[in-house]
Image: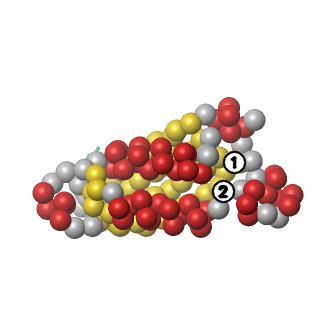
Amino acid sequence: MDLVLIESLRVDTVIGVYDWERTMTQTLVLDLELATDIRPAAADDAIDKTLDYAAISERIAEFAATQAFELVETFAERLAERLREEFNIPWLGLTVRKPGAVPTASAVGVRIERGSREEAAS
Ligand SMILES: Nc1nc2c(c(=O)[nH]1)N=C([C@H](O)[C@@H](O)CO)CN2
């Protein structure tokens, strides 16, 4: 199974459970592993045969800018759902970090994996 990677993508969004967090944006830092077969794209040197990490990064920034959730769990779940649907991604791993949320930790957050690795490998 091949992966397209997006690492340390910073996006601004309204996120948090406390009242003061509902009135401002905060930065989340995302890592993504996106399963795809890179061989067709490599064979033809063709961007339209792979997952375009630039287009996906833009889509994530737009998603973040237009959504407002309380939990990083909800942000991760909804984003994974949206990306899998829009870009036809059979499996993805997504880490969402919220730097500064716990001052004594460098970051806190969640990691999820969604979809089927078997489907991605075939
Ligand atoms: N598992 C989670 N725990 C907490 C979250 C969260 O999204 N998931 N959020 C908060 C607050 O919004 C916090 O980040 C504010 O500093 C607390 N715990």
Identify the residue at the far right of this view: 43
- In what quadrant of the picture does the N terminus appear? top right
Amino acid type indicated by mark 2: Leu
Determine the residue positioned at 64% across, 35% down.
117
Residue 105, percent across and down?
A: 30, 57
**Mark 1 Cα within 10 Å, few/some/many (few <14, many 20+)?**
many
Judged from the image, the secondary structure of the residue bearing numbered disc 1 is strand
Determine the residue positioned at 36% across, 50% down.
75
The residue carrying mark 2 is 51
Residue 92, percent across and down?
A: 56, 45
What is the total number of numbered labels drawn onto the structure image?
A: 2
Judged from the image, the secondary structure of the residue bearing numbered disc 2 is loop
User: Sequence-wise, which precedes: disc 2 or disc 1?
Assistant: 1
Rendering colour mode: secondary structure
Using the rendered image of the protein, determine whether residue 104 is visible from the camera's viewpoint: no
Using the rendered image of the protein, determine whether residue 3 is visible from the camera's viewpoint: yes
Determine the residue positioned at 59% across, 41% down.
91
Tell me if 74 is positioned left or right of 53 in this view. Answer: left
Determine the residue positioned at 56% across, 36% down.
115
Cβ–Cβ under 8 Å for marks 2 and 1: yes
Amino acid type indicated by mark 1: Thr
Residue 36 is tagged as: 1
108 in relation to 91, above or below: below
- In what quadrant of the picture does the C terminus appear? top right
